[in-house]
């Protein structure tokens, strides 16, 4: 299988403000790819360029095998873009909004009618088709916005932070939709600043910060390459953890203690042996695999969660 997106050396400024300094990554066809970064990292700018809404200053971009500069109209026919802001007619029903968006993307007549029924089913709002959008929650509106981008059966769907500020039920629906799209062979590019979402949904990811890609690849690959494992120990109430001379710093965590280490098995064995000798009651002793959170922290020196 080829790549649905290939980006190299993408640069974009707004006046004298440089938003993208050097963005490069590839998205495999049929995969779900996460673009992860804090606010202002350059996620929306990258997505708008891919969707043909903004022109880059320089760089090479191919989408679905086509050159973005020369074949941008053909690309637009085959992609669905879900912007961050909700763009719907409040006074119209959900179905009438979809008629409008469907016609804009060239779907008409019977085909449009049946697609509207299908996408409303997909986003879990079939029973609200005739209701005015103004009566919907923020999460429901966002689901209609996603439905609008699916009407023309795009091969690639680009979603800009679709889960920001919405209720858990809508968030779960969006997750299920993304899984469904993947099953149908649709490629999904998805931006977020929630690491747990990338861990739950994405095959590959790029971490971007200040307009640059700082890590790119499969989730496990990135965790193995940049992450640090830890060992977690929990003892009976009132007991203190044995020292681990030369093996790392012990820090309190949750109801126990943790040690970050490149040699988790050594730390685990040393702790197990010391606890046995001191006759401590071990409630939990385990190796904890690295998370994207620790990777992000070690790469940027800041935490991603900023809201
Ligand atoms: P993200 O989606 O990761 O939050 P953006 O792509 O929206 O990041 O923004 C990247 C940088 O470009 C930020 O510093 C932002 O302030 C700036 N920026 C975005 N849009 C504009 C604009 N229309 N005019 C000027 N600066 C902008």
Image (spheres, helix red, strand yellow):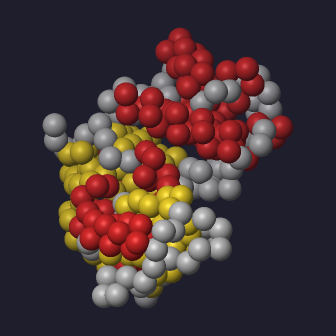
From where the camera sits, is residue 185 visible?
Answer: yes
> Foreground: 193 or 74?
193
Tell me the residue at 27%/70% (across/down): 266
- Quick one: quadrant of the C terminus? bottom right
Q: Quadrant of residue 74?
A: top left
Q: Position of residue 81 (x, y in %)?
A: 47, 46
Residue 99 vertical placement versus 8 (above, below): above
Q: Residue at x 41, y 67 (%)?
A: 276
**Location of residue 290 (image quadrant):** bottom left
- Return the x and y of residue 163 as percentages of the image width and height: 59, 51
Residue ID at (60%, 18%): 117
Q: Where 147 sits versus 61, above or below? A: above
Residue at the far right in the pictured view: 135
Give the percent coordinates (x, y) of residue 300. Answer: 40, 81
Q: Position of residue 115 (x, y in %)?
A: 52, 20
Direction from residue 194 to residue 24 in the image, left or right = left
Residue nearer the viewer, 202 or 257: 257
The answer to whether any part of residue 51 appears in the image is no
């Amino acid at each position: 299988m080829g790549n649905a997106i290939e980006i190299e050396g993408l640069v974009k400024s707004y006046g004298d403000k440089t938003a993208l300094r050097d963005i490069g990554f590839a998205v495999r066809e049929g995969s779900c790819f996460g673009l992860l970064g804090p606010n202002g990292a350059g996620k929306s700018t990258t997505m708008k360029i891919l969707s043909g809404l903004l022109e880059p200053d320089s760089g090479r971009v191919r989408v679905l095998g086509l050159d973005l500069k020369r074949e941008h109209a053909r690309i637009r026919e085959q992609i669905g873009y879900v912007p961050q802001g909700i763009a719907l007619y409040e006074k119209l029903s959900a179905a009438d909004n979809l008629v409008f968006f469907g016609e804009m993307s060239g779907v008409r007549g019977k085909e449009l009618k049946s697609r509207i029924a299908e996408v409303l089913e997909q986003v879990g709002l079939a029973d609200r088709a005739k209701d005015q959008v103004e009566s919907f929650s923020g999460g429901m509106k966002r689901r209609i916005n996603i439905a609008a981008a699916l009407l023309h059966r795009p091969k690639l769907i680009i979603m800009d932070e679709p889960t920001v500020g919405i209720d858990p039920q809508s968030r779960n629906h969006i997750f299920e939709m993304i899984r469904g799209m993947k099953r149908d062979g649709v490629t999904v590019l998805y931006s977020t600043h929630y690491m747990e979402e990338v861990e739950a949904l994405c095959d590959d990811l790029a971490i971007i910060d200040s307009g640059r890609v700082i890590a790119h690849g499969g989730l496990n690959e990135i965790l193995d390459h940049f992450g640090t494992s830890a060992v977690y120990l929990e003892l009976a109430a009132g007991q203190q953890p044995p020292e681990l001379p030369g093996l790392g710093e012990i820090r309190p965590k949750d109801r126990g203690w943790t040690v970050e280490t490149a040699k988790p098995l050594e730390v685990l064995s040393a702790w197990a042996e010391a606890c046995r000798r001191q006759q401590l009651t071990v409630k939990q002793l385990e190796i904890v695999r690295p998370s994207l959170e620790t990777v992000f922290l070690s790469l940027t020196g800041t935490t991603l969660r900023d809201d």
